[in-house]
Amino acid sequence: MEKLDVRIDKWLWMVRLFKTRSIATEACNAGKVKLNGVNVKPSRDVRKGEVYEVHIGSLNKTVEVVDTPKSRVGAQLVPQYCNDLTPQSEYDRMKTLKTQEFRPHGLGRPTKRERRQLDFIKDNYFDGEFDNE
């Protein structure tokens, strides 16, 4: 595999998986970016052909490194630099979670406790069962 001399946190930001580089760095430090099931440090250099698992919110994305851009790229150019290998079932699961987040009219915004409960369900819900990872 060819080494591309770009840090993983910078690459994740460049291909628009994270809004800022500092958020990408925090995700790496929190163990939300994995290579072959092993947590990746933010300073690790990316290589062509590597496949990373990135946990963004409650979405588990799988991306393959194709190349490295010189700087952050527009959304239309992202496919030139990474392949999205995320299974369609993961996107369907996210769609299902969004439809289950219905709140009847007139109840107002969720309280802090209700928000935490919703976040717990979103993070741990997987195909109708709770994920035991």
Image: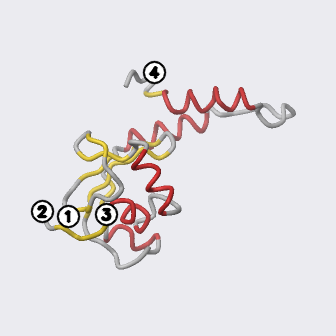
**Residue to which mark 4 is pinned:** 130
Sequence-wise first label, 3 or 1: 1
Quadrant of the image containing the N terminus: bottom left
Q: Are marks 3 and 1 in contact (CB under 8 Å)?
A: no
In this view, 6 is above or below 118: below
Amino acid at the residue labelled 4: Phe
Foreground of the two, 66 or 20: 20
**Residue to which mark 1 is pinned:** 48
Sequence-wise first label, 2 or 4: 2
Q: Position of residue 74 (x, y in %)?
A: 46, 74
Sequence-wise first label, 1 or 4: 1
Q: Are marks 4 and 3 in contact (CB under 8 Å)?
A: no
Q: How many marks?
A: 4
The residues bearing labels 4 and 3 have C-alpha atoms spaced at a distance of 30 Å
Residue 114: quadrant of the picture? top right
Helix, strand or loop at disc 1? loop
Amino acid at the residue labelled 2: Met
The residues bearing labels 2 and 4 have C-alpha atoms spaced at a distance of 37 Å
Q: Are marks 2 and 1 in contact (CB under 8 Å)?
A: yes
Sequence-wise first label, 2 or 1: 2
**Residue to which mark 2 is pinned:** 1
The residues bearing labels 2 and 1 have C-alpha atoms spaced at a distance of 6 Å
